[in-house]
Amino acid sequence: MDTRQDDLRRDLDATLQARKELGKEYESELVDSFLARLDARLDARVERRVSERLGPADGYGPAAGAPYGAPGHGHRPRRFGRGGSRLPVVSMALGIPLSAISGGTAGFWGLLVCWTGIVGVNVSAALAERVEERRRPSAPRSEWD
């Protein structure tokens, strides 16, 4: 058993001993106190896990005293979907005028080259994201394990 569980067990034992000494009239206060301590531990653990996942290495880790939205506050750029980037949306939006320009000047072959380039950029960005995800170390399933 690790020290976190030992500490939790000691807190619970102390709460139960205090309940035996003080009687049932203080039971709700003792339970509330124990739950408050447990809640504080869970909050600290969640904060630590979130800061580990966001990490200051990418420039978006939480920094003490940083205003909301500032780099270092923990605010990440907004992403679309489950981890995709804005690139597909931007490339579709830019694809319309690029299609008009390339189709108007070079016809079918201009359109083919334009959309091959757009698809190539999107595919390479998607592959780069997958490689980056595979390189990240996997997090443990649970801290209770």
Image (cartoon, rainbow, N blue to C red):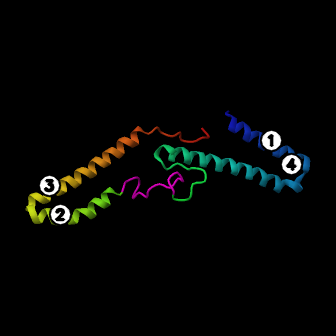
Q: Is label 3 in a helix, a strand or a loop? A: helix
Does residue 58 belong to the magenta stretch?
no
- Earlier-in-chain disc, 4 versus 1: 1
Residue at 50%, 53% (x, y): give it: 71
Q: Amino acid at mark 4?
A: Arg
Mark 4 and mark 1: Cα distance apart in space = 10 Å
- Earlier-in-chain disc, 4 versus 2: 4
- Earlier-in-chain disc, 2 versus 1: 1
Mark 3 and mark 1: Cα distance apart in space = 72 Å
> Magenta span covers which residues?
70-85
Mark 3 and mark 4: Cα distance apart in space = 77 Å
- Earlier-in-chain disc, 3 versus 1: 1
The residue at the far top in this view is 1
* Residue at the spot of label 4: 19
Position of 53 with respect to 39 (left or right) is left
* Residue at the spot of label 2: 99
Mark 4 and mark 2: Cα distance apart in space = 76 Å
Q: Amino acid at mark 2?
A: Ser
Q: Nearer the viewer, mark 3 or mark 4?
A: 3
- Earlier-in-chain disc, 3 versus 4: 4
Q: Nearer the viewer, mark 2 or mark 1?
A: 2
* Residue at the spot of label 3: 113
x then y, percent, for residue 110: 11, 58
x then y, percent, for residue 90: 30, 60
Density class for disc 2 (Cα within 10 Å; few <14, some 14-19, many ≥20) is some
Does residue 83 belong to the magenta stretch?
yes
Q: In terms of image quadrants, where is residue 113?
A: bottom left
* Residue at the spot of label 1: 13
| Callout 3 touching callout 4 (CB < 8 Å) | no
> Which of the image's four quarters has the N terminus?
top right
